[in-house]
Amino acid sequence: MARTRSRFKTADLTDQVVVVTGAGSGIGREVALLCARRHAQLALCDVDEAGLADTAEAARAYDAQVLTSWVDVSETESMTRFANATSERFGRVDLLINNAGVGLVGGFLDTNLKDWQWLIDVNLMGVVHGCDAFLPTMIDAGRGHVVNLSSAAGLLANPQLTAYSATKFAVLGLSEALRMELKPHGIGVTAVCPGIINTAITQNSLIRGAGDVDERRRHLESTYRKRGYTPARVAKKILRAVDHNRAVAPVAAEAHLMYVLSRTAPPLARWLAARMAELSK
């Protein structure tokens, strides 16, 4: 993992403008609130209007200035409107966190083409749309940082998360290429790869394939709940990764293990992936 120091510091975000997609719950909500506690100005979006309003209210309790917008990250026009509103309100963007994402449990043979398109549109194109909408002002300013949420499943493929893994591998590749491209513009890029994090994704992910869906979901939720790694801890890791300008930031012990094994011992990594796939069944 590259750890060149960045000019961007997160301990005090006074007067810094932070954009967070998918801010209505989970990691997006917690990173938004952490930035609010560190005195950032926030531009937040989500398709969950109630969750977004709740996050905004909590952020304003820290005296943060907050802009909220209903945004479907899979739609170019929706993201463009959000970027324009952010520019009109704050005039610039210092930290862009492309967090919005969706999940699907199932192997390739259980995943239909409509599912594939949905995952690609949100998980990959949502990141593309975020970068496309906000990077021009960051490039003009000659500074800033972009965080793209990949996943441990983007480090090591999981046969029970085939389509999801594919989109998260794509986000990782995009982030690494973008990091090199944006370096001359003074902009850092970090791909964050969380492991088993206890968020609502276990409740909201589609589940495909054989077996009782309700039972499989209960097992999935139980596994993530017992792991006990909270979105608030992920939020701290994200800002620390930005502070250190890390290229790739695995979060949680299993993600670090997968990162190391995928690069140093691929056969062992594939064995581990097969074992971890059992968690999704």
Image (spheres, rainbow, N blue to C red):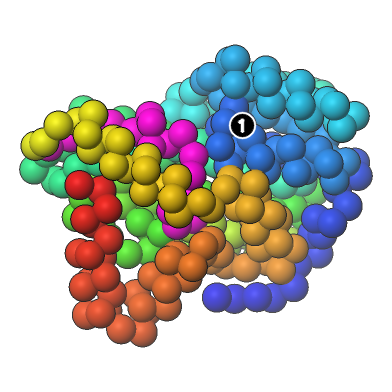
Residue 10 appears in which quarter of the rendering? bottom right
Quadrant in which the N terminus is drawn: bottom right
Instruction: Identify the element where label 1 is drawn.
Output: loop
Seen in the picture, residue 100 relative to 46 is either above or below; the reply is: below
Give how far across and how far down residue 213 sits, in percent.
Answer: 19, 31
32 to 24, vertically: above or below: below
Residue drawn at 88 percent across, 41 percent down: 39
Q: Which residue is mark 1?
A: 23
Q: Magenta segment, which residues?
A: 194-209
| Residue 228: % across, % down | 51, 51
Q: Quadrant of residue 104?
A: top left
The kind of residue tagged 1 is Ala
Residue 170 placement (x, y as % from top left): 37, 53
Which x, y percent locates residue 243?
Answer: 74, 63
- Which residue is at 53% across, 53% downward? 229
Q: How busy is the neighbourhood of tag 1: few (under 14 within 10 Å), some, or many (20 plus)? A: many
Q: Is residue 69 left or right of residue 268?
A: right
Residue drawn at x 49%, y 68% as measured from the top left: 253
Quarter-of-image position of residue 50: top right
